Image (spheres, rainbow, N blue to C red):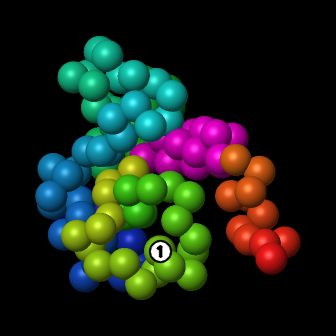
Amino acid sequence: MKSRPLAAVPTWLPVMEAADWRCQCAGECGNPHTKADERCPREHDGYTSKHGHRVRLMAAPADPCTPLTRAVTLPASDLRAWCPECHTAATRRTRAQATPADAQGGLFDL
C-alpha cells in the first residue's frame, strides 16, 4: 500500500491514480527527461537514487504559478502529480519568464 498524506486524501488519491503514481512533469522544470520518455521518472514512495531521499508526490495545479488562493479550490481533474523537485523548478522557471507587468498583478494599472 502506498503512503498517503494526512489531509485532502479524497482530492489527492484520484490525481495519483490518474498519473499511475508517477510525476507528470514533461519538461516544465527545465529538464527534458529524455531518458524516461519525456516524463519525470520519479514515482511515489520510490527513491531518487541509491542513497537519495524518498519521493512523496503532491497534487498541484498544472500551472505551477497558480495562486494558492485559487489552487485550493481546484477540482482533482485540474491537478497533476508533481515531485517536489520538478514543481519547485517549474515554478521558478514560470516566474522568471513572467513579464514585469504580470509580476505586479495589476497593482499600478489605471
Q: Is residue 56 above or below residue 51?
A: below
Provide the residue designation for mark 1. Answer: 71
Q: Nearer the viewer, residue 42 or 65?
A: 65
Direction front: furthest residue? 110
Q: Residue at x 15, y 60 (%)?
A: 17
Our reading of the magenta stretch's main secondary structure is helix
Quarter of the picture holding the C terminus:
bottom right
Left or right of residue 95: residue 59 = left
Q: Is residue 77 visible?
A: yes
Label 1 is placed on what type of residue? Ala
Residue 20 picture location, percent across and down: 15, 50
Q: Is residue 85 visible?
A: no
Left or right of residue 19: residue 32 = right
> The magenta stretch spans which residues?
83-98
Instruction: Please tell me in which quadrant of the rendered image residue 8 appears.
Output: bottom left
Q: Is residue 70 above or below residue 30?
A: below
Q: Nearer the viewer, residue 69 or 24?
A: 69
- How many residues crowd around disc 1 within 10 Å: few (fewer than 14), some, or many (20 or more)? some
Residue 108 picture location, percent across and down: 84, 72
Left or right of residue 5: residue 21 = left
Quarter of the picture holding the N terminus:
bottom left
Left or right of residue 108: residue 9 = left
Q: Nearer the viewer, residue 105 or 76?
A: 105
